[in-house]
Image (cartoon, helix red, strand yellow):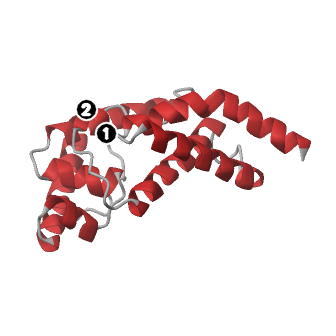
């Protein structure tokens, strides 16, 4: 038990400020960011035995938990104003940059951020709400005031544009494999 507490305390000291900044970059309030930090560390404490260094770095694991907490936060708070100001989402990555895979992921995220930033409205807002905020098609429709069917079509269209932009850039990732050809 003491080892667990020591490890969580070490993670808390190492990551609390970084995670709070990560949450604040998403456009939520300081109070909500602090609450999400607490929830993240509770999850880290409760799931510390599930962490497997062979599956990824500690940094990636911590930020994956934080990202999921942020998504859950937006799902619970459907009435929160949607963040559509792309500047708040620029550089929203969680790689440590310490390995070749992280360098490739960073390059992919930089190109993806740039490509999403270049999308025209309402496609940009639809991608941000659905893919970054984790909103359903129905929630995205409600927030944008666009019919669900139109949101779906524009999302597919945006995926095609993003996929093509990444292909042209020489980045061939299967992250958009679900987008229709």
Q: Which quarter of the rendered picture does the C terminus lie within?
A: bottom left
Provide residue 88's location: percent of width, then percent of height.
30, 34
Residue nearest the viewer, comparing 149 with 78: 78
Task: Specify which label sits upstream in the sequence, 1 or 2.
Answer: 2
Res. 148 image quadrant? bottom left
Residue that appears at 73% across and 49% down: 45
- How far across and how far down the image is residue 37, in percent? 57, 42
- Residue identified by numbered label 2: 87
Say left or right for 109 vs 150: right
Q: How many C-alpha atoms fall within 10 Å of the one at disc 2: few (<14), some, or many (≥20)?
A: some
Mark 2, secondary structure of its residue? helix
Residue 106 seen by the camera: yes
In the image, 95 versus 16, the foreground residue is 16
Circle 1 SS class: loop
Residue 159 lies, in percent from the top left, at: 22, 55
Q: Nearer the viewer, residue 144 or 92?
A: 144
The number of numbered discs placed on residues in the rendered structure image is 2
Specify whether 162 is left or right of 33.
Answer: left
- In this rendering, which labeled residue sits more in front, label 1 or label 2? 2
Q: Left or right: 122 with respect to 131?
A: left
Quarter assignment of residue 41: top right
Q: Residue farthest to the right?
A: 2
Q: Which residue is mark 1?
A: 171
Q: Residue furthest front?
A: 31
Residue drawn at x 40%, y 62% as measured from the top left = 75
Residue 102 image offset from top left, x and y in percent = 50, 33
Q: Is residue 169 visible?
A: no
Circles 1 and 2 in contact, beta carbons < 8 Å? no
Q: CA distance from mark 1 to mark 2?
A: 23 Å
**Relative to 167, 75 lies left or right:** right
């Amino acid at each position: 038990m003491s080892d667990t507490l020591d490890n969580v305390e070490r993670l808390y000291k190492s990551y609390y400020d970084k995670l709070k900044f990560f949450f604040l970059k998403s456009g939520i309030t300081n109070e909500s960011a602090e609450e999400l930090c607490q929830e993240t560390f509770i999850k880290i404490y409760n799931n510390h035995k599930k962490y497997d260094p062979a599956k990824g770095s500690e940094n990636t694991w911590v930020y994956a938990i934080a990202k999921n907490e942020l998504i859950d936060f937006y799902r619970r708070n459907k009435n929160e104003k949607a963040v559509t100001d792309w500047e708040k989402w620029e550089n929203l990555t969680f790689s440590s940059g310490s390995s070749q895979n992280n360098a490739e992921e960073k390059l992919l995220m930089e190109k993806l951020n740039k490509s999403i930033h270049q999308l025209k409205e309402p496609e940009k807002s639809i991608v941000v709400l659905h893919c970054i905020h984790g909103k359903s098609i129905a929630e995205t429709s409600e927030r944008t005031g666009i019919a669900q069917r139109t949101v779906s079509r524009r999302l597919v269209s945006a995926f095609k544009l993003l996929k093509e932009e990444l292909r042209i850039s020489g980045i061939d990732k299967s992250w958009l494999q679900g987008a229709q050809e």
